[in-house]
Amino acid sequence: MTELKPARVFEQFAKINQIPRPSKREEKMIDYLRQFGESRKLETLVDETGNVIIRKPATPGYEHRKTVILQSHMDMVCEKLVDIDFDFDNDAIQTYINGEWLRAKGTTLGADDGIGCAIELAILDSNDIEHGPLECVFTRDEETGLTGAEGMKPGFMTGDMLINLDSEDEGQIFVSCAGGRNTTALFHFQREDAPKGLFFMRASLKGLVGGHSGDDINKKRANALKILARFLYKVQEAYGLRLASFNAGKLHNAIPRDGMIVFAVSEDVKENVRADWNVFVSEVEEEFHVTESTMQFNMESTDAEQVMPLEVSTRLVQALQGVDNGVFAMCQDEELAWLVETSNNVASVETTDTQVKVVASQRSNVMSALDNQAATVKAVFQLAGAEVIQGDGYPAWKMNPNSQLTAIAVETYKELFKKDPKVLGIHAGLECGLFSEKYPNLDMVSFGPTLRGVHSPDERLHIPTVQMVWDHLLAILKNIPA
């Protein structure tokens, strides 16, 4: 990365990617940030949640400008290819350049939001940039619940304007975001021996694109969990089955890319099930022939094992077939008709010896619609007899039509690049939603360089857009008013 531009940003990003920083286990990154600020004699604080703030005084002549907060999250999604040996708690991310894209070898890249952190550190480490008073904020655990931003107490940040560096499309300035909530359904049981005369089968699906359950929910990508549930429902309705295990997906904010089921059917229908599987595979491949060109299906016989009680597995399969997944509604406002308003992502299912745990993630830019979607998902699992747990979630960030910062961001972009940026809302959740509750007068925007394949091993950063975002950010800082 030493030859990439802007050099000072990619130098910081290379250093960041040597530091393990899984969500909820960011201690090494927190220590690095503390040492970074203190070694440069900058005021550096760590709050009780683990968020870090580093304050940098204004450059000469800019002392009376409004204080700007630059904010990004320090944690990263830890996803890897199945056949890659990698320890996210100890190993450094291995990067390589592929044309205009920066990628990682078999893992997530960590540019979400490591590149935002790198931009902040590059500014803190510079002495030739014109700016007013700065507060560089690094929140923890954004990816698995926004707990860093949620745990931040009012008064930790003192700035007037905030620039969130966690967006993924250069040329787009975001001024609102979706709220979200997670639903967890637990099916409890005691395993039992399988009846005699059953034939056990293992079916799996892998190689899906996956992606971010907010940004990518409307891109017609297959959900491995829902596809396997579809097949189980077909078999259950046609022949009956006994389910041993169902495992798919890992993260609440990622579309499941792979999964595996183990089940048993009567010996005399096993060939029918195999034939049905082949037909099903062909149909699904055709259904997703544009977006999922690398999906891989497999079915094989396997050893007998204990199974779930029939009533439990029947209700589980029915619930996974019935629960809503994908886009539920688009925005009603004409200027935002392209934006997903409300959605649900059935994100993961995990089987242990005594329970099945299903996690689903609901999002909406309208809080009443979010409540309704969360209630709809909850009701499906309640009807299936599951124990259902829902958190409070996080709020949506409403657009401020009188935002001074938005106006500055738009005008500086037009001056730099001779074209208009897009001012948008986003269906993904941003920490700005929580900040808007704690700091109701904070003027905020969000932007960043172009990323693709986030939350998956296909994550990649478009190198030329980093320079564009860097130039744009410096122009904004130079034009902040008194």
Image: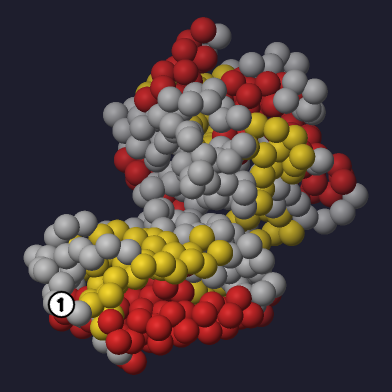
Query: Which of the 4 image quadrants contains residue 13?
Result: top right
State the residue at coordinates (66%, 44%): 460
Residue occupying the far right of the picture: 418
Snapshot colouring? secondary structure
Residue 471 screen position, x and y as percent: 78, 34
Inspect this view and state whether residue 458 appears.
Answer: yes
Query: Which of the 4 image quadrants contains residue 281?
Result: bottom right
User: Which residue is under mark 1?
Assistant: 196
State the residue at coordinates (45%, 56%): 253
Q: Quick one: 320 or 239, which is closer to the camera?
A: 239
Residue 258 screen position, x and y as percent: 47, 60
Residue 421 screen position, x and y as percent: 77, 55
Query: Which of the 4 image quadrants contains residue 262?
Result: bottom left
Which quadrant of the rendered structure holds the N terminus? top right
Q: Quick one: 160 or 36, which is closer to the camera?
A: 36
State the residue at coordinates (15%, 81%): 311
Q: State the SS at label 1.
A: loop
Q: Quick one: 146 or 231, which is closer to the camera?
A: 231
Q: Amino acid at mark 1?
A: Lys
Which quadrant of the rendered structure holds the C terminus? top right
**Other-residue count near label 1 (Cα within 10 Å), few / some / many at <14 / 14–19 / ≥20:** few
